[in-house]
Image: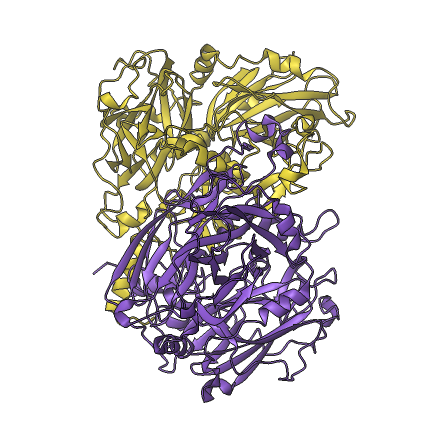
Chain colours: A purple, B yellow
């Protein structure tokens, strides 16, 4: 296997790249404006689709799965008109990784944090300026389990030559790789299983391991496993499984790429549960960006990508003209899903799949339970050219939150709680509660900066007898300008195991100062990198481990902060960081907004006090 | 088989009963008030359930399927606090047959006609006085296909002794029989199939005939048909089918009933598609009320019940103490569903099912395509003690609407259109558009009182070349006090067939002057009964036939008027009768209402014009 050759340009850091990194950290507002506007119309509907050759109903945008790609330049205004053509479900879209600076917290698309769900028949206009970020992002539904239903797509922000932007590397071509896990059952049925209360005849049903892995919306299930499903169950047409379906693999090919060129892969784990590892036969990958933040280039053979994470990697097409396997395996959980396999095609190679053995490649990828690999790779990344964590401000955290996740029974149901709290959506979006200054819009004082009990990572803190449990909203009230440290400490489940969790923060990126496995965070800074830590948006928390992050509370507004696993979100593993604006003024809902929950009746009451007729 | 003996009391019509009938027709407002309030809390959630022994996800209320029974007296105030615990779906509840008089059109529960969907986490308080009606009603979800998902229950209004109410018959006991068709696939998947546009590779998929018939939420599927479904598809637990499930038949028993007593059966077809016929082994049924309106008692062996209809029947337990079959068959459509069978148990009979052959009873029920039976029975019913259709007002219709349904392709999709219009929900409830006097809240002028072309029941009017087609809201604007005749004329589908349709009017009951099959309505009144026609809420329209109804436009507000088959509603077979109040004043939305669609942005705009702070 040839080593990757890092392009010379990657080693040359321009002033602009440093400037960009600094902007990312201090988040000046509003973002630099290009004066250009990119407009998209998204019509959201259901469709039957066969992503892994098995037909089921999914959510499509403009009839496409994955949904339309958004491709803009830094500083562009992005307008996405989202029309809901679902039957009864409300929707929202989160622009994952895009920091809604400039007072655009309403556009962040977390249902019940940012805005009310968009109801059927309605159109909501997302309208924001892409901030001082460049790189690979994605968008996805952010109400209930919609991102599990095919409701997602890619989002690329390119350097803006008008601002003199350059990137610290060069590539001759690029490809988008959206990879994810896939189930035959709907998120709704999955959630129903999670919500079964314990009683003498039934209990919690986990969603189980995925049936397939997909790349750019395509995988391949073994149809022979379904050959005996009777039409009597399926009403004759539900369990179509055909490997000749144009909607599924093995047609998926990345490329063709030009021999001897440098090719950029934009890799996103858009999945719901699985921590994935990707390998490319005969090619190393040089990681150049993590979550749209440049990193010191580093070459890897096997790339871990947690759910929600993005990596930009370069590959050099220096192998013989042929097709090469791309394989994806499940890590962190005992897999029960065949590795995904697709083709990387060189230009000039014959059409078709590689003739080598994909299983051999997958077998070389790190074992699902190889935590040392996970930890080493997670801590491998450093910010390119240093980090402004060396700034005096960022060096001085003003507050430390220790957030322990555990699994507990709350009201008879298994919930994933944080410092004793299982989060549930409020009926009123938190932006609205803040703007209208309403009491009771969300529960206050429920969560504290420390877990209720001293934590021990091997102790079963999940049992009700030693833990105060609550259901509601857990909102950390933070002052603008605070420097916040969060110690994410991984507790145990009710079966005395520990699951890996990818943590994602909206509104701001954070530095990953360090992570470890098999220990409590003991307060020592010995394992923390305060020199050039990677700056990113989603980070892994290893089983029985801790991860230490820091961010500057620079972006006023309420920001969702949560495990990105859809089932864990449903089970309560969320919190909100509300950054109180120094000005004391929260922005007003944008014109055309819908109201819901507590707001409408109050506004309507005012309306009637004013005479009850539209002006 | 013994003949039913009609209780003597049934022949004695009291003044009060006549008064009730008169009140029903002229709908004085507000309804008589008892001063009593009955309160219910409905928590709506999903659950796995096995109504026919096959597990699937359904919608339950307070964890029950069918949902809780409502049982009140005439004149009671009913308060139902409905809390939505679904994940992303909005809901509403219609109180089927309850006439929302007294300005309570907002409480009628047709999503997007009466009010906005109740969103997850929200509670909506239905609050209305049950009007001058007594008898058997039901309630069901009225957003998307929710009534197909188990989201329904019974609603009984009893005579109020405080008002001197009596009923024109006596019964020693009573039972509720909610019977319906059942599918293993969700309404959502069914709707997706209906919505597939025609293209070279796919087209419309009909929902198909039901897998089972249920009585009070229980039926029995043949589990052996599912024995081979692999766990690989179902994630290990989805296709449970067990006849020992406590949720399904054969445990369903009506009774025990006291030998030699008169027993009242309250029979409702809560189904989504199937026109049902019910028979009781060894017993005739004496029909005493249709849709909560007393009819001249008439004895039948086999009772047709269209979807949405209710009948009150009396049976006399004059047979030997034993268990007797209740069988239900599908009519009007070629059935592909085994007859439903349950037990009527006499007190003292051994536990268990009858030992006779249920199939023999079902085989005696009228054949699915025996239209003569259907027509004869539909026209058999007359109002008890005459009808106030003999009133001069009711004798003089002021407007005749000829409403032809046909099946057409609209924008590539198969739709069920009425006078050329395929109805779609507006984004703003029609009550709101009217109160706020908004332009564009619903399409106006789209539908006319006559079909675009002269109708011929055997002509394929469905082809686009001879029919002007449109999609939108079809709202008939009617003056309060108008006497409206509607000729429902059944056109043909795109495969040149004709389906039966149960038509249901909200807000008011109507007289059924007549119906026929195999002909165009030719304007002749020869087949119309203007002396003592039955007064009811839902009536059948026979394939290739017509049904002639009349109502007094006595209840101001917008009222949904539609085929009660869920798939046909989805395909557009709806219209709205808006009765413009003589006062010119539409009532304001009730306090606590949610807004949606066009209203919120306008109200919010006003709010900001007033300073943008809650008073």
Residue B261 visible in rendering: yes
Q: Is residue A343 above or below residue B562?
A: below
Q: Residue at x 25, y 49 (%)?
A: B585
User: Image quadrant for the C terminus of chain A?
Assistant: bottom left
User: Image quadrant for the N terminus of chain A?
Assistant: bottom right
Q: Position of residue A418 (x, y in %)?
A: 61, 69
**B278 or A461: nearer the eye?**
A461
Q: Is residue B207 above or below residue B142?
A: above
Task: Name the quadrant containing residue B254.
Answer: top right
Q: Position of residue A212 (x, y in %)?
A: 58, 45
Task: Name the quadrant containing residue A566.
Answer: bottom right
Judge left or right: residue A398 versus residue B417: right
Q: Position of residue A604 (x, y in %)?
A: 33, 61
**A7 or A352: nearer the eye?**
A7
Residue A207 visible in rendering: no
Judge left or right: residue A241 versus residue B603: right
Q: Position of residue A611 (x, y in %)?
A: 25, 62
Task: Name the quadrant containing residue B2.
Answer: top right
């Amino acid at each position: 296997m040839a080593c990757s050759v890092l392009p010379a340009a990657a080693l040359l850091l321009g002033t602009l790249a440093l400037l960009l990194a600094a902007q990312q950290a201090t988040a000046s507002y509003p973002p630099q404006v290009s004066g250009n506007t990119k407009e998209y119309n998204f019509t959201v509907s259901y469709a039957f689709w066969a992503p892994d050759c098995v037909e089921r109903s999914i959510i499509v945008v403009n009839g496409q799965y994955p949904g339309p790609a958004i491709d803009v330049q830094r500083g562009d205004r992005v307008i996405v008109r989202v029309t809901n053509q679902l039957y009864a479900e409300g929707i929202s879209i989160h622009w994952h990784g895009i920091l809604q600076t400039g007072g655009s917290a309403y556009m962040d698309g977390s249902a019940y944090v940012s805005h009310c769900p968009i109801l059927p028949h309605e159109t909501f206009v997302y309208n924001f300026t892409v901030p001082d970020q460049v790189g690979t992002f994605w968008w996805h539904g952010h109400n209930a389990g919609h991102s599990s239903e095919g409701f997602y797509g890619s989002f690329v922000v390119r350097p803006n030559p008008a601002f003199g932007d350059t990137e610290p590397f060069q590539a001759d071509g690029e490809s988008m790789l959206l990879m994810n896990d896939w189930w035959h059952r709907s998120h709704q049925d999955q959630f129903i299983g999670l919500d079964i209360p314990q009683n003498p005849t039934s209990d919690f049903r986990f969603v189980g391991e995925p049936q397939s892995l997909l790349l750019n919306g395509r995988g391949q299930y073994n149809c022979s496993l379904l050959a005996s499903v009777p039409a009597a169950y399926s009403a004759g047409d539900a369990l179509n499984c055909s490997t000749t379906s144009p909607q599924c693999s093995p047609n998926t090919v990345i490329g063709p790429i030009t021999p001897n060129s440098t090719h950029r892969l934009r890799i996103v784990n858009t999945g719901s549960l699985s921590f994935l590892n990707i390998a490319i036969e005969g090619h190393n990958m040089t990681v150049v960006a993590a979550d749209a933040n440049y990193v010191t280039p580093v070459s890897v053979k096997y790339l871990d990508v947690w759910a929600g994470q993005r990596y930009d990697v370069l590959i050099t097409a220096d192998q013989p003209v042929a097709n090469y396997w791309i394989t994806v395996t499940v890590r962190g959980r005992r897999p029960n899903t065949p590795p995904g396999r697709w083709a990387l095609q060189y230009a000039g190679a014959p059409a078709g799949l590689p003739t080598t053995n994909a299983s051999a490649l997958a077998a070389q990828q790190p074992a699902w339970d190889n935590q040392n690999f996970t930890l080493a790779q997670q801590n491998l990344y450093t910010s390119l050219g240093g980090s402004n964590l060396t700034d005096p401000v960022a060096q001085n955290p003003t507050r430390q939150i220790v957030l322990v996740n555990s699994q507990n029974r709350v009201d008879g149901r298994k919930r994933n709680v944080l410092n004793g709290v299982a989060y549930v959506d409020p009926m009123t979006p938190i932006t609205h509660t803040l703007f209208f200054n309403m009491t009771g819009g969300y529960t206050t004082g429920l969560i504290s900066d420390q877990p209720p009990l001293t934590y021990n990572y091997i102790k079963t803190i999940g049992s009700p007898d030693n833990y105060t449990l609550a259901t509601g909203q857990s909102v950390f009230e933070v002052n603008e300008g605070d420097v916040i440290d969060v110690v994410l400490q991984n507790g145990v489940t009710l079966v005395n195991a520990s699951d890996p969790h990818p943590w994602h923060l909206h509104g701001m990126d954070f530095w990953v100062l360090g992570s470890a496995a098999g220990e409590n965070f003991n307060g020592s800074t010995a394992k923390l990198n305060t020199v050039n830590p990677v700056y990113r948006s989603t980070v892994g928390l290893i089983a029985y481990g801790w991860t230490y992050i820091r961010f500057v509370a620079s972006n006023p507004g309420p920001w969702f902060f949560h495990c990105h696993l859809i089932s864990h979100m449903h089970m309560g593993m969320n919190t909100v960081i509300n950054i109180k604006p120094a000005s004391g003024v929260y922005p007003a809902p944008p014109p055309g907004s819908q109201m819901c929950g507590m707001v409408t009746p109050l506004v309507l009451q005012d309306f009637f006090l004013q005479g009850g007729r539209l002006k």
